[in-house]
Image (cartoon, grey):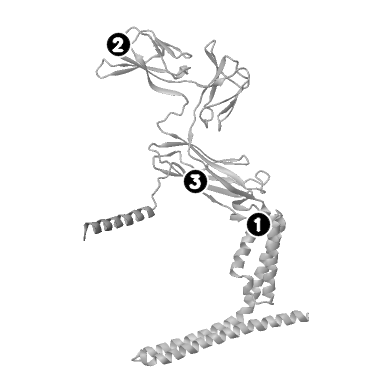
C-alpha cells in the first residue's frame, strides 16, 4: 500500500472516531442545589381544558406533599438554614423533614407536607405559581456582615503607640487585638487585654499604653458596621447589602458624625426576605444608618406555574371524567351492536359526557359533576347489557372451540404412537381444517345472533 493510500485510510478512521465521539453525549456535572421536585397526593395531573394548560391539581382541604432532592457539589460542607415553598397567594410552607447539613457531594431529601387551602384562600379560577427555596451557609465561611479576620495593622518599633484598622466604624465589642513577637523562636502570639489599649470605634484608632517593641507585628479581628446610607431628615427606608437575614440578628444604629456616637434604634421594622428596613423616624442630615446582621446564601430556586386547587365538585367531577375515559377506552361506542339497548345507553353516555365537558369548561363544576356521573352510569349500563347479550352465544362458541381443540389433541396423541409423522401429516392438516371450520361456523352463529337480537329490539321498539 502506498503512503498516500495509508494517509487516506488513517484520515478516514479518524473521521469515523470523531463522528462517534460527537454522537456520545458528554456527562454534565450537576451544579449544587435543587436537582428535582415531585408532587404527590394530587387529584389530577395533565391538561385541564378549564385552565387551558397542564396542571397538578389538589382538592381543597386535602393533604399535599412535595419532595425535593438537593445536592451539595461544593468542596466544603454546607449548613442548611432554610427550606420552604412560597405560593403566590401568600402562603409559605416550611419543610417538615430536612437535613441540617449536606456534606460535600451529598444529596439530601427535603419533604414538604401541608394541607391545601380552601378556594377562598387560593382561588380555583386560575393556576398558581410557587417557588421552592433552600438556603445554606458554607461551613468555615463567616456570614456576619462586614467581618475582618487576621488583619495586619502594622509593625512595632518601640515608639509608635497608634494603629488603625482598615474598616470603620468598628463594633467595639467585637475587637480582638494580637501581638506577634517575631524575635522569639518560635514566634509567639499574645491576645492583648482591652485594658492595654484605647479604641476609638468611629475612627478605628487603637492606642496602646505601651508601644509594641521592634519585631512585633500587630493584628486584629473585628466586625465593622455596614453603612446603609444617610438620612437627610427625609428617608426612612434603607436596605441591607445581603439577604435573607437570620431572624433576630439585625441591629440598626444611627451614627452621629458630630458626636461620633451610635444609638441603637427602636421601632424599626425589617423584611427578612429582602433586607428592607423601615425606621420609625428619618435620621438627620449628619446621621448615617449603620447595621450588623447575619445572612445566608441560597441555591437557585425551582419555580412552577401549574399548581391548582380544585373545589369539591370540581375534584369529584374530574375523577368521574377519568373513570368515564377509562371505561370508554375499553368499551368504545362502535363496539356495541347498533340499535341494541346497550348501544343506545352508550350513546346517551357520550351525550352526557359532552354536556358535562361544556359545563366544566364554563366553570359550572356542580352541573358538570352531575352529568359526568350520568355518563358513567349510562356507560356502565351499556356494558352490562352487552355482556348479558353475549353470554349464551359466547358460551356456545367456547364449546365449539373446545370440541375442536379436543379433536386436534386426540389426533396428535394418535400420531405420537405412529412410527412416522410424515405418513400422517395430511390427515393432521385435514383435522386442523375441520377445527378451523368449526371456529368459523361458531363466529358466524355469534354474529347472526347479534343481528337477530338487534332486529328483535328494533321491531319491539317500533311496535311500542
Identify residue for label 2. Answer: 214
- N-terminal of the pair, mark 2 or mark 1, is 2
- Residue 190: x percent and y percent? 33, 17
Q: SS for tag 1?
A: helix
Mark sitting on residue 439: none
Q: Residues within 10 Å of mark 2 (few under 14, many from 20)?
A: some
Figure quadrant of the C terminus:
bottom right
| Disc ID at residue 68 | 3
Residue in the foreground of this view, choosing between 63 and 274? 274
**Whole-Å distance between the Cαs marked 2 and 3?**
59 Å
| Residue at image point 46% right, 13% down | 203
Residue lying furthest right in this view? 464
Given this view, does label 2 or label 3 mark the residue nearer the observer? 2
Q: Is residue 22 left or right of residue 461?
A: left
Tell me where residue 430 sits by quadrant: bottom left
Q: Residue at 71% across / 56% down in the picture?
A: 366
Instruction: State the image coordinates of residue 114 (x, y, percent, origin top left).
Output: 57, 45
In the picture, the disc for residue 316 is 1
At 61% across and 70% down in the image, what residue appears? Answer: 331
Q: Which image quadrant: the N terminus?
A: bottom left
> SS for tag 3?
strand
Q: Quadrant of residue 47?
A: bottom right
User: Residue 212's quadrant in the figure?
Assistant: top left
Q: Using the numbered discs, state the Cα–Cα distance from disc 2 to disc 1 in whole angstroms.
A: 86 Å
Report whether 79 appears left or right of 332.
Answer: left
Amino acid at each position: 500500500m502506498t503512503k498516500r493510500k495509508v494517509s487516506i485510510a488513517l484520515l478516514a478512521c479518524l473521521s469515523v472516531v470523531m463522528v462517534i465521539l460527537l454522537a456520545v453525549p458528554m456527562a454534565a456535572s450537576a451544579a449544587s442545589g435543587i436537582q428535582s421536585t415531585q408532587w404527590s397526593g394530587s387529584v389530577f395531573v395533565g391538561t385541564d381544558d378549564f385552565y387551558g394548560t397542564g396542571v397538578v391539581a389538589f382538592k381543597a382541604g386535602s393533604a399535599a406533599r412535595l419532595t425535593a432532592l438537593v445536592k451539595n457539589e461544593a468542596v466544603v460542607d454546607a449548613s442548611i438554614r432554610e427550606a420552604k415553598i412560597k405560593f403566590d397567594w401568600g402562603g409559605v410552607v416550611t419543610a417538615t423533614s430536612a437535613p441540617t447539613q449536606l456534606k460535600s457531594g451529598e444529596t439530601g431529601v427535603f419533604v414538604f407536607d401541608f394541607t391545601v387551602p380552601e378556594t377562598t384562600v387560593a382561588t380555583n379560577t386560575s393556576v398558581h405559581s410557587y417557588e421552592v427555596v433552600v438556603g445554606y451557609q458554607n461551613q468555615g465561611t463567616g456570614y456576619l456582615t462586614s467581618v475582618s479576620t487576621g488583619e495586619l495593622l502594622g509593625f512595632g518599633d518601640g515608639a509608635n503607640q497608634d494603629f488603625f484598622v482598615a474598616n470603620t466604624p468598628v463594633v467595639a465589642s467585637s475587637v480582638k487585638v494580637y501581638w506577634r513577637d517575631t524575635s522569639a523562636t518560635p514566634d509567639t502570639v499574645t491576645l492583648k487585654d482591652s485594658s492595654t489599649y484605647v479604641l476609638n470605634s468611629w475612627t478605628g484608632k487603637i492606642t496602646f499604653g505601651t508601644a509594641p517593641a521592634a519585631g512585633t507585628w500587630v493584628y486584629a479581628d473585628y466586625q465593622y458596621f455596614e453603612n446603609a446610607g444617610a438620612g437627610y431628615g427625609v428617608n426612612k427606608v434603607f436596605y441591607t447589602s445581603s439577604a435573607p437575614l437570620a431572624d433576630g440578628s439585625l441591629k440598626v444604629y444611627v451614627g452621629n458624625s458630630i458626636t461620633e456616637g451610635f444609638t441603637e434604634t427602636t421601632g424599626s421594622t425589617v423584611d427578612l426576605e429582602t433586607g428592607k428596613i423601615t425606621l420609625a423616624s428619618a435620621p438627620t442630615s449628619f446621621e448615617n444608618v449603620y447595621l450588623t446582621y447575619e445572612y445566608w446564601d441560597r441555591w437557585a430556586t425551582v419555580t412552577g406555574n401549574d399548581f391548582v386547587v380544585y373545589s369539591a365538585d370540581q375534584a369529584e367531577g374530574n375523577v368521574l371524567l377519568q373513570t368515564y375515559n377509562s371505561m370508554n377506552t375499553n368499551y368504545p361506542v362502535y363496539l356495541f351492536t347498533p340499535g341494541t339497548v346497550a348501544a343506545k345507553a352508550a350513546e346517551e353516555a357520550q351525550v352526557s359526557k359532552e354536556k358535562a365537558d361544556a359545563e366544566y369548561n364554563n366553570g359550572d363544576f356542580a352541573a358538570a359533576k352531575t352529568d359526568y356521573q350520568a355518563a358513567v352510569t349510562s356507560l356502565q349500563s351499556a356494558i352490562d347489557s352487552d355482556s348479558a347479550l353475549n353470554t349464551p352465544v359466547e358460551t356456545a362458541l367456547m364449546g365449539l372451540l373446545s370440541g375442536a381443540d379436543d379433536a386436534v389433541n386426540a389426533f396428535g396423541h394418535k400420531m405420537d404412537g405412529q412410527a412416522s409423522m410424515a405418513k400422517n401429516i395430511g390427515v393432521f392438516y385435514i383435522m386442523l381444517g375441520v377445527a378451523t371450520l368449526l371456529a368459523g361456523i361458531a363466529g358466524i352463529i355469534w354474529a347472526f345472533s347479534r343481528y337477530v337480537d338487534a332486529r328483535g329490539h328494533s321491531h319491539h321498539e317500533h311496535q311500542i
